[in-house]
Every structure is written in C-alpha cells, then in structure tokens.
Image: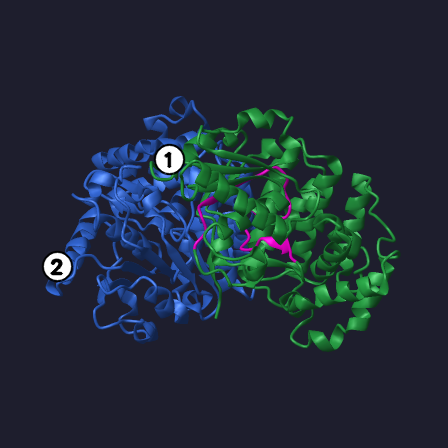
Chain colours: A green, B blue
Amino acid sequence: MFRNFKTVERIVFGRGCFNQLDDILSVQRSAASPAVVFLVDDVFTDKPLKDRLPLHAEDLLIWVNVDDEPKTKYVDQLTAQVHQGMAAADMQLPCGVIGIGGGSTMDLSKAVALMLTNPGSSADYQGWDLIKQPAVYHAAVPTLSGTGSEVSRTTVLTGPEKKLGINSDYTVFDQVVLDPELVADAPRKQRFYTGMDCYIHCIESLTGTYLNAFSQAYGEKALGLCRKVFLDLHPDSDDQLMMASFFGGMSIAYSQVGVCHALSYGLSFVLGVHHGVGNSIAFDYLEEFYPQGVSEFREMLQKAGIDIPRDVVSGATDAQIEKMVDVALILEPLWENALGRDWARVMTRDRIRKLYEQM
Amino acid sequence: MFRNFKTVERIVFGRGCFNQLDDILSVQRSAASPAVVFLVDDVFTDKPLKDRLPLHAEDLLIWVNVDDEPKTKYVDQLTAQVHQGMAAADMQLPCGVIGIGGGSTMDLSKAVALMLTNPGSSADYQGWDLIKQPAVYHAAVPTLSGTGSEVSRTTVLTGPEKKLGINSDYTVFDQVVLDPELVADAPRKQRFYTGMDCYIHCIESLTGTYLNAFSQAYGEKALGLCRKVFLDLHPDSDDQLMMASFFGGMSIAYSQVGVCHALSYGLSFVLGVHHGVGNSIAFDYLEEFYPQGVSEFREMLQKAGIDIPRDVVSGATDAQIEKMVDVALILEPLWENALGRDWARVMTRDRIRKLYEQM
C-alpha cells in the first residue's frame, strides 16, 4: 500500500504575493461564518508586517509566542481562546485559521484548526491518523523557511508525555502563501538553524530505506537548493530557501526523517532545545550514519560563522537522559527508515544514551 | 498578481499502486451516484490491463481512440455518450471520470469531466478561465509519461477554428495514480516523443521570461531527470520519466512553454501531426532560440536511434501554411514568455512562415 498523498490545494508563490492574502481569504468568508483567526508570531508586534495584516472587523488576531516549542497545553489554550472569541461575537466557528510565522507558528495554526472541530485535548491526537473530523480551513504564510511545515501532514507538539506530531491528512494546509520577501528579515541564526532542518531532513530522507523516485526527486532538488543557499551563498537565496523548504517537505511524502530527528526530539522534550538547534547539535555527532552529510553540514556551519551549542547534555540528570532515550525510541518509523526493519537490534538504549552523552 | 496555483489534491506514486484504484474510487461512490466512467485508451482492449480495471456493475467503460489528437467534436460525442449511458440506467451524473492512457486520453477525460457539468460545446471553452462550473471528480492513470497532463490546468483540444486548451482551475485532476509499471510497455517511439514533450517544455520554461524560483526548481529537476532517462539511460527510467513528467508539468505553474510549442500547435492543427512528434519536428529548427537545448536534443535523438519526420510541410498548400501561422500566433502567452513583451515586433508572420517552410 502506497500512501495516497494529500497535497496543499492552493499555492501562491512570488515576491509580494502576501498582498493577495485578503483576496484569497475573501473566498472563504461567508455570512454565516465571516471571521478569520490570525495566529501571528509575536516578533511581529512592532514590525511593519503588523500593519499589512488584512484584518476585517469580525476577525480575531492572536499574537502567539514561540519562545518555547509548541506544546499541546498551549494549543488547547489557544483553541479555547478562539471558541471564546467566537462565542462573544455570537459566531460558531471561524471560516479560517491563518498562521503567519515560522514552523512553530505554522504548527500551532494547524493544531488549532484541527482542535476547533475535534473534541478533547490535542495531546489525545499525537500519533498517526487519530484525527476523525476535518479541520477548519487553514492557511500558512511562512516568514522563516526550512521546516517544511507548510506542506507536511504533521504538526509537531510537545505533550505531557512525548514530543510527537499530529500526523493526519486533515493536518495539511488548504493554502500556502509563499512570499520570499517575508523571510528576508529573519534573524541570521534562526534562518540558519531552520535551513539546517531542511538540509538534515533531506539527507535523512535520501539515505533512508523508505525512499522512492517521488521522494528522491524532491529531496535531491531540495538538497541542491540548500547548497545554493548555504554553500554558494546565491544572491536569490530567499527564493531558493523557500523552495528548498517546500521541496524538502514534499520529499517526506514517501520517506521519513531519521536518526538526527529522533535524537533531536529527545533534546527538545527534556531540555526545551528548539527543533532546528537540536537537529544541528545532534547531527554533528552522526558522522557514522551520515558521513557526507555531516561533512558538508560542517562546511555550511563554517561559511555561516555559526558555533553550535556544546555540552548541552552534560548538566542533565540520569533520569533526564533516560527520558530522552524514551522519547527518541517512540519514533519507530524514523529508526526503521534510517536503519531498516531490524533497527531495534542495531540501535539499543545504550547506544542512544552514548550518542546523547557526547552532545 | 501571482497565480494561486491549484494542485492535484491526491497523488499516489509507486510500483503497483494501480491496484489501489478500486479503494480510491470507493470513497467517491455514493448511493445517489454510484457509477464511475472509465475512459481507456483502446490500445489496451487486448492487453492484460483490461482485466485489471476495477469495474463495478454500474460503471461505464468507454474505449477511446487517440490515433488523432483530441478534438472538441470527439469530446462532445463522448460527453453525450456518458449522458446517455447514465440516463439509460436512471442515473444523473457519474461520481467520477477516470482517464487511463497517455496525454491525449488524460486530456479527453479532463474535458469530458468538465463538459458533463458545463453547457454547450467544448469548443466554447477553448481559452483561459472560461469554465464556470466545477467538473465531475476526475482522476488520471498515466500509461505514458511526458506531457505533464496529469498535473496541468489545461486540456489541449483541436476545435473547428483552433488548437487551444481549456485552461481552468477546474481542469486540474482531483487525483493521479502514478504507477511506473504501467509505462514500461509503451512503444519505443511513442515513449521517446512523449518524453521529448517534457524535455522541450522544460527548456522553454527555463529560458522563458516568465520564470520564477518555483517554476525553476521544478523545471531544473525535470530536465535533470530527462537527462537521466535519455542520455544516461538510467536503469530505473520508468520511475524517473514519470517524475520528470510530473515535475515538468508543475514547472509550468508560473511559466509557459515557448516557440516550439507554438509552432507545433500549427503543425497539429493543419496536418494532424501528433503533439510530441510535432514538438520534435519543430525543435530541430530552433537552434537560434534554444542553442543548448537543441544540441542536447539531437544527442538524445541519436542515443534513441530515432529519425524524426522531415519535409512534412513541403506538400502543404499556401493556405495551409497561412493557417499554421494563424494557429501559432493565437498563442500570445507562449510568444511573450519566449521573446518578451515586444514579441510581436520580433516574430512576424513572415518569420514564422519561414520557420515552417524548413520543416
């Protein structure tokens, strides 16, 4: 059985296409359900983008804080806030949820759109295909590129017990607005780490056992675009990075990430390390699994003049390290993709622990 | 204004995924509208694929003949046949139209799905965004790769006055089933010419004035895949060619084809030359526009041991050549993409005529 891959139905790409957002949303608004919910990264509260948001009187603007990785608790709180906002204006559901920001903001928006129509806590749906009801229409406007969240079927959340995505066809955005001008002002380090998320998941996808020609075509091109951006320092790098992120996300359709993402999830869950940073920390110790990828990654690090954090695990307690191992081990498809069906024989708890202890 | 590009919503890719077609269609069938219409290239009437069609009792199987390029008259006739078939079984519309074949069969299926819900003749809708009503659900199963019809927003038809597509967001398939096993048995020449359609539209797209990073990423990868298939003779060439076709089609999202396609349309309309063959005939005389592309194309021709038809225009009357020029000149976006806004000053009737007279 091959996955019948659900795509993003509408994609607009172009410098300045953010200006089309109002027109795009107008199609969704109806008399019964006129309100759009904007979830916007709070770094923009004092930026010019704030005044460009196409807000209508009935809309709800919520500034989201993504200093921490997205948590199920935060998703539940935001969902309640939307329900309250709608109730206060005598409305039922909004006609759309729009996420404007990086991977964390996009993931929060996907999760809120899903939880508006599915009962309980978002933590109940961490896993694969547990969502039963279609989400509210949801769209993404990335202002950071790399995670591939704009095209993926997951929203990665840290819950009470695990860091794991809500993986579902309903998670996929209905619309993405890809305006390379919006990623131009991202802070240098954040841009780099988010870009490395893309680079690393392409390496993991392309060397994985799940790969087929579909994922390979997308992954190879995404990798080539990452090289243009981080090695050749291409003048058009905002456009290239945005496409790298999109293609990198598409490459996961029939493949998976691997060892690095599994370990990075443990770092995030226990130590609160951001996903992109966690990937970079872990990847530097994975030469035995991804020799060429790690070597090229180090060249990218050097070109960007970035020093990745060291000794992040040294202060962790034994229990914390054991929990990291637990979190990493849950991610069976990632291990199977990286190491084949017999992965559990190769990748023991002890070996994972030893990898963490170097970081 | 950038196009808000409509994608194919569901894509399944994999060797043998044709076996999932019945499951995929079952989601569309309903008590009120249980019937699926299969439009299948009649080359399969005595092939094993015939017995693998997931036909239910209420379905309609129509063998389509694509010896000639798809004509608006044929679309209207097929649409009437579907309406009659449905009426005879006391049903309204089918729940889906499935095209199984190459670009011509896929284009016929798109057109029938559109015309089942839009009044009049398909010739009325040749142009850009003239379709007003959504089509019946329609899916494609390509058995030949190259045209990109599986992802494009057009269905190219020869009408009483012109060869021109029905370009519309409603034209886009809802589902594509990409099974590389199905293209394995295509006749050698047909496979080559269809592949060259992909190669040539990538060259036209990548050298065009409309290009942006989105179309470039898809076009470059499609071109690379064409090289794998037709220069390196890659062992996995069915998979690669299928992806090349898909990426080539996607590359047209924000670009256009160019001089070669415009001239090829004239050859098809007046002389009935098949699209892929017409592209190859024309491209060989377009060194001044696409020097590198034409040189590489000749290398591909040689590797494949294909002799393209020569002197096809030599027997044409003056009126026929004038009609070819007319048909080519209608295609303004193609000329503008190739030659810029001032194309009409550069590309005179006389110059087009001279190009045709060489062929």
Report the residue at 29% width, 66% height from top: B43
- Residue visible at 63% across and 46% down? A104
Q: Position of residue A26 (x, y in %)?
A: 39, 34
x, y percentage for residue B53? Answer: 31, 71
Q: Is residue B291 magenta?
A: no
Q: Does residue A170 appear left or right of residue A46 in this picture?
A: left
Name the residue carrying label 1.
B355
Above or below: residue B359 compared with residue B75: above
Examine the rendered structure and indicate whether residue A282 appears above or below residue A67: below
Query: How far apart are the alpha carbons under marks 1 and 2?
Result: 46 Å
Residue A341 located left or right of residue A317: left
Q: Is residue A149 magenta?
A: yes
- In the picture, the disc for residue B190 is none
Q: Please identify the quarter of the rendering in which residue B185 is found.
A: bottom left
Q: What residue is at 75 percent from the left and 39 percent from the top?
A: A189
| Residue sitting farthest toward the left | B88
Looking at the rendering, the stretch of residues picked out in magenta corresponds to A134-159
Query: Which mark identifies residue B84?
Result: 2
- Residue A9 % position (x, y): 44, 47
Query: Which comes sooner in the sequence, label 1 or label 2?
Result: 2
Chain of the residue under label 2: B
Asked if one can make out residue A245 in the rendered structure from this viewpoint, the answer is yes
